[in-house]
Image (cartoon, grey):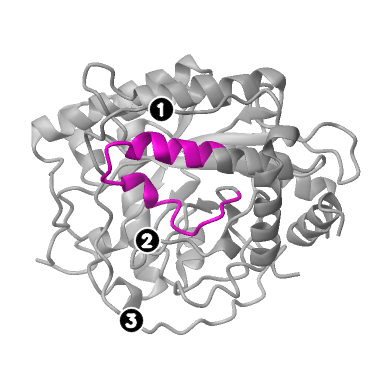
Amino acid sequence: MNRMKIFSTILLALTTATSSACTGLLPFTISAPLQAQYTPAAPLASQTPVIVKPTETVSEPLPSATLSTNTAARPTGVASQSPAILLFGIGMHVEPFGAVPSKLVGENLPGFVKKGNYHERAFFERHVRDIQTVAEIIERHSGRMTVQAQTPFTQVAIETGNSVLADLAASGNEIALHFHEDAHLGKNSERLPVRTWCAVMKEEIATVRQASGVAQIRYWSGGNLYPAVLDAAACAGLDINSDWKSPRTQTTPLELTGIHPWRPSGGTDGIDTQWFSQHDPFGKIVYLPEGLYERDDFASMRRSQSPDGDPAYFDFLAQSLRASLAAAQPGQVNVFHFTLHPAEFRGDPAHPYATLERFLSEVIDPLVASGQVRWATFSEMADAYHAWEQAHPGLEPLAAAASDQELLLGQ
């Protein structure tokens, strides 16, 4: 059965049954002015890339799962009677404000023109404080983030001796890469060869490592419209991806949503998702879908200009999390996560990020206390999926998920 139809059908059915399927969840409502907005990346130049079926190559095994007892579960089997657990995480994208394309691509290429520049000390320090504040709030609720950074933020941190990324890592947050291809590769990035992408991604990873002191960077987001991005990322030493969204339309095809990770068979140009939405047991990249959503603009709707934009987004987020929780299957890895940006959802300056904190208090904390939800970084989610693969060699995760969801609906 088509995954998009399955997820859309189950989301509709589960949403109407939320009150009976997920007891103990409090309604989430709060009013707060929207003080800051995140500006999305400029659309890339129109291209017509060709989707090529990936070659049949056997990937190297992922590192063994090393999960802490309070983060991710090790599933025991599809038929397991143990309760289903939804692994929940929060990612943070640090944007490339003030970036200039890598010299590996060419000299004197236009920079990333957006409001703000991390080379301006006040702007940089303001975002550092925002990141620290959000991290403190999440830590108060026993959670950790997957913080995805890139230049020039990492460069400025190194040059000024700012230890924000190292401090986050020391507190248990995952440090990862957010890769804006237009910022680092220029406007014609989709026409560049894999070796150039790989080299520039390695360059970015090196600055993330230097700024954070973290030896291994595994996760990245970005490069979504480059059909060979999975090959480039694997070449650069990365093995986990998520947050797929078209920078042109600011939407995510519903066939790329869900709660069960998989290994994409190939990349996508944003139009043809055939290979990306198919599982390849030998694929080198683990993809973490963001959850079950009933609309494809869930990533961009958080930028509503209305006064109640923040609460409305978190209301929708809570609804989507409940549907994802109701669809979670025992014996499988079930994931749900969403993304923040520095200065996003800051709200009332007297009570910064109150909407986020209330969401964690009213929605997430009760679910964690009941054992239905467990905090996890993105690498911990991927490690849980890797453990599931080892326990079920040859089992197709998406087919198993479809079968379980059909049984759940009584079809």
10 Å crowding of disc 2: few (<14), some (14-19), many (20+) = some
> Is residue 313 magenta-colored?
yes
Q: Is residue 297 above or below residue 326?
A: below
Q: Would residue 137 be seen by someone viewing this image from the given angle?
A: yes
In this image, 180 relative to 314: left or right? left
Q: Callout 2, which amino acid?
A: Gln
Magenta stretch: give its range.
292-318
> Is residue 172 magenta-colored?
no
Alpha carbon separation for disc pair 2 and 1:
22 Å
Q: Would residue 61 be seen by someone viewing this image from the given angle?
A: no
Q: Quadrant of the C terminus?
A: bottom right
Residue 365: quarter of image: top right
Mark linked to residue 290: none
In this image, 186 relative to 177: left or right? left
Nearer to us in this view, 49 or 399: 399
Alpha carbon separation for disc pair 2 and 3:
17 Å
Q: Callout 3, which amino acid?
A: Gln
The picture places residue 110, in percent across and down from the top left corner, at: 12, 65
The picture places residue 86, in percent across and down from the top left corner, at: 67, 36
Residue at x-position 39% and y-position 46%? 177
Q: Callout 1, which amino acid?
A: Leu
Q: How many marks?
A: 3
Mark 2, residue position: 250
Mark 1, residue position: 356
The picture places residue 107, in percent across and down from the top left corner, at: 12, 67
Disc nearer the start of the sequence (2/1): 2
Residue at x-position 13% and y-position 48%? 115
